[in-house]
Structure formats: structure tokens, C-alpha cells
Amino acid sequence: MSVLRTCVLIGFFFLACHFGSEGFVLQFNSYCIFDTMEDMEYQLMFVFNKQPLLQYNPRLEKFVALASYGFGIVKYLNNDTAYLQEMKQRVNTTCRKTMSEYWKKTVPRKAQPSVGIDRIVPQTTSFTTALKCHVVGFYPPEVSITWQKNGEMVNQSVYITPVIPNGDWTYQITASLEFTPSMGDKYICLVNHVSLDAPIAIQWKPGINNYETYYSTAATIVFVVGLLVLFLGIIFWKSAYSGFMYIPIYGNTDE
């Protein structure tokens, strides 16, 4: 007996029981549950008007009723030994056969993370500086992030966000460290992931960050260009002024 024949059987059953009603929807959902390729389970569930009706239980190797009006159908299905044997083999013919094609493309997939550090100024704490270690683009989602100060692990004032999916089978996470910087201190964000041959260590030293560097460089360039324009303007003005000379007219100009 196929799943289609089972659906037809259940459909006729509810047509007989609910004849004259506005209508009904009968659905069946089949799915595979597993952690590895060896411990797979195949399950099949029938749903009537969004209410679970009956289900195939692979551990019991038979159908079980999930609603009172499903007992009659379950009794009929469990008497069909050939159909029960077919359902038992679905774990191989459907689950393992299908998942073997996608297993290597999904489960063992690895993506290495990208790591960067930004400095911010906390608004509500007594600390003068906070560092954010951004870890993005990694898969699987399990990742380890630690902060080190001068070679020693820092446990206090460290805040790690939950892992967030990016929507492209990669994840991101942020680890913040609040502190008061002092000269000579070295801070390292250490990231360990299964895709890495060795942990990624990004070091930060007290000083201006990249944004401040770019801003200072741009301001310096604008200042220098302004001075050059000013000097050129003064030279041009001096040249124009020195070229103008008063030429006196000889003789008496009085009438």
C-alpha cells in the first residue's frame, strides 16, 4: 500500500464522516530525524484540518492514533504487514539514500571566520574605553572567543553576544571588553574555530584607531591645501598690486 492509497483511504473516511460540511484539508508530512547517518528515524504524520490525526512511530514499528477518530484507521493500517514493512524500510530508501547526496555539502561544511577590533566609548559605565571583537562569516556556529591582557586571560567586564545567523549559512558574534587603557598594555582577541588550523589572535594597543587615523590624515591634508591656497592668494595679490604704478602727467593741469 502506498502513501497515496493511504491518503485516499483516509480522505474517503472523512468524506463519509463529514459529508455536507464546507470542506476539509488532509495533509501528510514525512520527515527524517537524525544526528548522524547511523541513527536516522523515518516518521510519517497525517493531519486533518491542522489537527494531527495519526503517525507512524519507527520505534514501535507501527501507526499510532493522535486523535480519537483515528483509531479505526490505525487498526486497519497496522493489520497490513506489507505496508508496515515498507514503512520500516523508508529509513533506508528515503532518509539515508537522500541525505547521502547532501551530507557532504552541508554537515561537514566549514567556513573560516573574519576577525576585527573596534574601539568605542562606553556611555553608561565608569570605564573610559571598550573594545569590540567582531567575528563574522564562520560555520558551524560553535566558536570560542577570549580576551587577553598582556598575555593573561581577562574574565571580568567581558560581554559576549549570542551567535547570530547571517542568513547565508554563516554566523557572527561580538565579544566586548570594557577597561581603562594605560600605556604599555596589550590586548588580544583570541578566536578559536573548528575551521582554523590555529587560533586567530588580533592585537590592540592604546592609540588612535583606523577611523581616527583616516580622519586625522584627511584633516591634515585639508589644512595643508588651505595653507597653500592662502599663500598662493597672497603671492598673486602682491604681484597684482606691485604691477600697478602711478604715472604723473607733466605740466599744469589747472584750467
Image (cartoon, grey):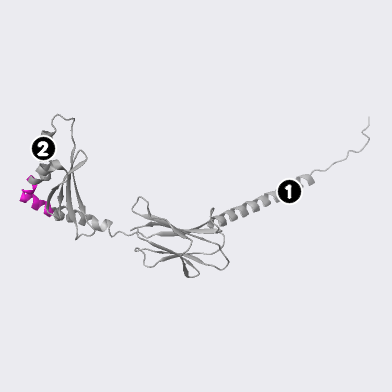
Q: Which residue is mark 1?
A: 234
- Provide residue 149's location: percent of width, then percent of height: 50, 67
Q: Is residue 1 visible?
A: no
Secondary structure at numbered mark 1: helix
Q: Looking at the image, which is closer to me, 163 or 225?
A: 163
- Provide residue 144's location: percent of width, then percent of height: 39, 63
- Provide residue 230's location: percent of width, then percent of height: 70, 49
| Amino acid type, mark 2 | Phe
Q: Which residue is mark 2?
A: 13
Q: Earlier in the sequence, mark 1 or mark 2?
A: 2
Q: Residues within 10 Å of mark 2 (few under 14, many from 20)?
A: some
Q: Residues within 10 Å of mark 1 (few under 14, many from 20)?
A: few
Q: Tell me the CA gap for discs 1 and 2.
A: 100 Å
**From which residue to which does the magenta span run?**
76-89
How many numbered badges does the structure rendering display?
Answer: 2
Image check: 245 left or right of 155?
right
Q: Is residue 251 magenta?
A: no
- Mark 1 or mark 2, whichever is nearer to me: 2
